[in-house]
Image: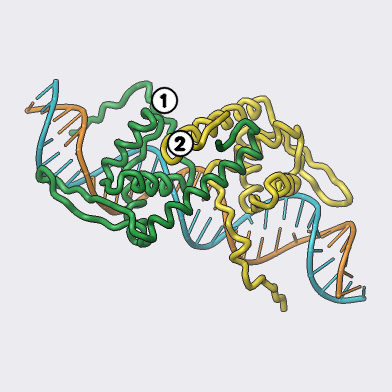
Chain colours: A yellow, B green, C orange, D cyan
Amino acid sequence: MYIKLIPIFNGIMAKNNLYKGSLNTIILKLLQETDSMYGYEITQKVKALTQGELSITEGALYPALHKLEADGFLEVEVVKVDNRLRKYYKLTERGTKETADKLSELERYIETMKVLVNPKFSLE
Amino acid sequence: MYIKLIPIFNGIMAKNNLYKGSLNTIILKLLQETDSMYGYEITQKVKALTQGELSITEGALYPALHKLEADGFLEVEVVKVDNRLRKYYKLTERGTKETADKLSELERYIETMKVLVNPKFSLE
DNA sequence: AATAATACATCAGATTCTTATGTATATAAA
DNA sequence: TTTATATACATAAGAATCTGATGTATTATT
């Protein structure tokens, strides 16, 4: 019999609320900077960079990685470390182009939101 | 027989790509500024403010308005103008609170994305 | 007379996410 | 030593949010 103990006040965890489409942009950008990363490493990197503000769930991450690979934006290399599998992903040429597109799309989006909801938002 | 003429180069239109959750924030903020608006007016206002960059589709807008109303964030008043119906929406008290929450959520989100993808992004 | 604009609405389908669950190994704690 | 945590992958159900298509109806424009 398996009993999972769950925190009583788990409301204090929650609060993720990733905006649609953000995840691909995040993955691509991280790979642009770090060249080669595996899935679990990405979740940890995001947590660290955002000081826990953003937790990429595995249920979102792995399917996203598979799709980016299927679309030809990432290539994968499987490596065994300490008897455990790691799948290292890196950008393809098309992936590098896609990264630039996604980033400018994000910039445009933020510019647009700035106009709509808050004159204080801006890009430097 | 109905034949719909469509633009040959409709690729130049496309490009909407609203991020998930943005729409509610936009609606709430516009109502905070303008006090009372009807659906069609919102679509036109968004087009005008963003110079066509963002087009709120009716298929997204109307269900969103209904849900915001059902959740108690908006109240509606139906008015007949030129023999046509208009449904004027305005913020309830809870809606005003929700607006503030959504706006700070957006600020946090942009701050987070800034850390992750682009050191040039910032709030003033 | 036909088309575009105004004004509402719903629905199928796609995408993207959360939460839960599952497998398996390695390490740290009780 | 057993248990829990960390590492590392994966899938699947269901919710939420969007696009694009379609529908109704009136008014204004061409």
Q: What secondary structure is marked by label 2?
A: loop
Residue at the spot 73% in from the left edge and 47% down from the top edge: A48
Vertical order, B70 against A35 (above or below): below
Nearer the observer: mark 2 or 1; the answer is: 2
Say which quarter of the image contains residue A112.
top left
Crowd band around label 2 with a 10 angstrom C-alpha radius: few (<14), some (14–19), many (20+): few
User: How far apart are the two marked residues, 2 and 1, measured between alpha carbons?
Assistant: 31 Å
Q: What secondary structure is marked by label 1?
A: helix
Q: Chain of mark 1?
A: B
Q: Which sits in the foreground, A89 or B18?
A: B18
- At label 1, which amino acid type do we have? Gly
Q: Chain of mark 2?
A: A
**Drawn side of residue D7 relative to residue B121, left or right:** right
Residue at the spot 69% in from the left edge and 73% down from the top edge: A4
Q: What x and y, as percent, mark residue A80?
A: 85, 46
Residue pointed to by mark 1:
B11
Q: Which sits in the foreground, A102 or B29?
A: B29
Q: Which sits in the foreground, A55 or B30?
A: B30
**Drawn side of residue B30 relative to residue A67, left or right:** left
Residue pointed to by mark 2:
A119
Vertical order, B116 against B93 (above or below): above
Crowd band around label 1 with a 10 angstrom C-alpha radius: few (<14), some (14–19), many (20+): few
- At label 2, which amino acid type do we have? Pro
